[in-house]
Amino acid sequence: MQFLNLAAEEKINPLIPHTAELVVGAIAFILLFLTLRKFVTPMFEKAFTERTNAIQGGIERAEKAQLEAQRALAQYTEQLANAQAEAQVLREDARVQGAAIIEDLRIKAQEEAARITATAQASIEAQRQQAITSLRTEVGALAVELASKIVGESLDDEARQSRVVDRFLEDLETTNN
């Protein structure tokens, strides 16, 4: 019996499946494959497509943002350069205006100094003339009094007094020079 058993055992190989199992397994595999292909694969493909679109959209948005940032940077750089140039022009204008104001103030100060000097000279000349007139009057009175004492007669005559005073002053000036 053992011999029969061995022959029966040799006939059934556990590594080779039965034909019915092969057919049922093949049908189950085909059904599973078709189900996955019809229902699951489109969902994966849709998810992959959405993911790809999202990535592409993100890349495009990033590129657009980068281009916009570069344009903004260029614009800000240009504005900064313009502002610096304008500031330089304003500084130069301020320097020129400052120099003009200083020159104007210097001219006004010179004019004021000249006016004050002229006024002072006129005042000094007027005081000098007043002093000369005052001195002439006093010297004339003293000269008339002295001449009256020397001559011994009164010099009440105005014309005579004037001649005596003028002669005395002329003699005095020629003596000093």
Image (spheres, grey):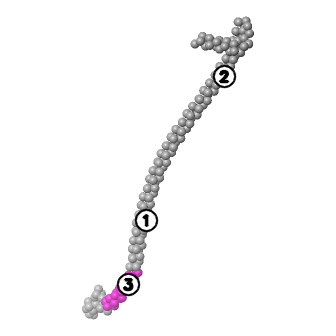
Instruction: Name the residue located 41 percent from the left edge and 81 percent from the top edge.
Output: 43
Q: Amino acid at mark 3?
A: Leu
The C terminus sits in image quarter: top right
Residue 113 quadrant: top right
**Number of marks drawn:** 3
Q: Secondary structure at mark 2?
A: helix
Q: Which residue is mark 2?
A: 130
Mark 1 to mark 3 CA distance (whole Å)? 41 Å
**Of the image marks 1 and 2, the number of the one nearer the N terminus:** 1
Contact flag, marks 3 and 2 (Cβ < 8 Å): no
Q: Which residue is mark 1?
A: 65
Q: Amino acid at mark 2?
A: Gln
Q: Nearer the viewer, mark 1 or mark 2?
A: 2
Q: Which residues are magenta?
A: 21-44
Q: Secondary structure at mark 3?
A: helix
Q: Position of residue 155 (x, y in %)?
A: 72, 11
Q: Which residue is mark 3?
A: 36
